[in-house]
Image (spheres, grey):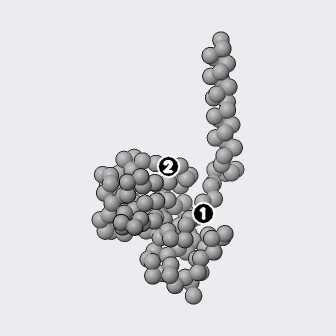
Amino acid sequence: MLRTVLAILLATTLLLGCSSSAPSGGHVQRNFPQNALRGSLVIGEAPEVLLNGRSGRLAPGARIRDTGNMAVVPAGLIGGRFLVHYTIDTLGLVKDVWILTPAEAAKRWPSRPEEAAAWSFDPAAQVWIRP
């Protein structure tokens, strides 16, 4: 009896915690770092990827977030092609990846470091302004 009550309380707590963590409508406002670039990513057998049509590798401990901002493992995405924002570590490996929602994809975002250097970034609004 006590186990049943504890199980129900735990399940209720988990459900309430999950339902209150996302804003209504299920959309999560994500803030991307200024050093993130936009690109096309195809996940191969980890750690191999194609980034903008070129071979690349995921960094050890790389993080991939889906459109709901949940962490996903590369093995579940093999063969998928995604429009993403990504960061590169100091060794040239793909470190952080965010799979974009249609609303995020509609915003202007640099795809090359040269563009990011020439444009202005507003981190609060999460928009880039071209000169």
Image quadrant of residue 91?
Answer: bottom left
Residue 47 shows which numbered tag?
none
Query: What residue did someone put label 2 on?
Result: 71
Residue drawn where x is 41% and y is 52% of the image: 61
Above or below, 131 relative to 24? below
Instruction: Pick the residue in front: 9 or 104.
Output: 9
Does the image show residue 82?
no
Residue drawn where x is 64% and y is 28% of the image: 10
Does the image show residue 72?
yes
Task: Classify the position of the N terminus by image quarter.
Answer: top right
Residue drawn where x is 68% and y is 25% of the image: 9
Task: Classify the position of the C terminus by image quarter.
Answer: bottom right
Q: Tell me residue 117's x, y (percent).
A: 50, 81
Sequence-first disc among 2 and 1: 1
Residue drawn where x is 32% and y is 52% of the image: 46
Q: Tell me residue 37's x, y (percent).
A: 47, 70
Query: What residue did someone put label 1 on?
Result: 31
Quick one: SS at disc 1?
loop
Above or below, 102 relative to 122? above
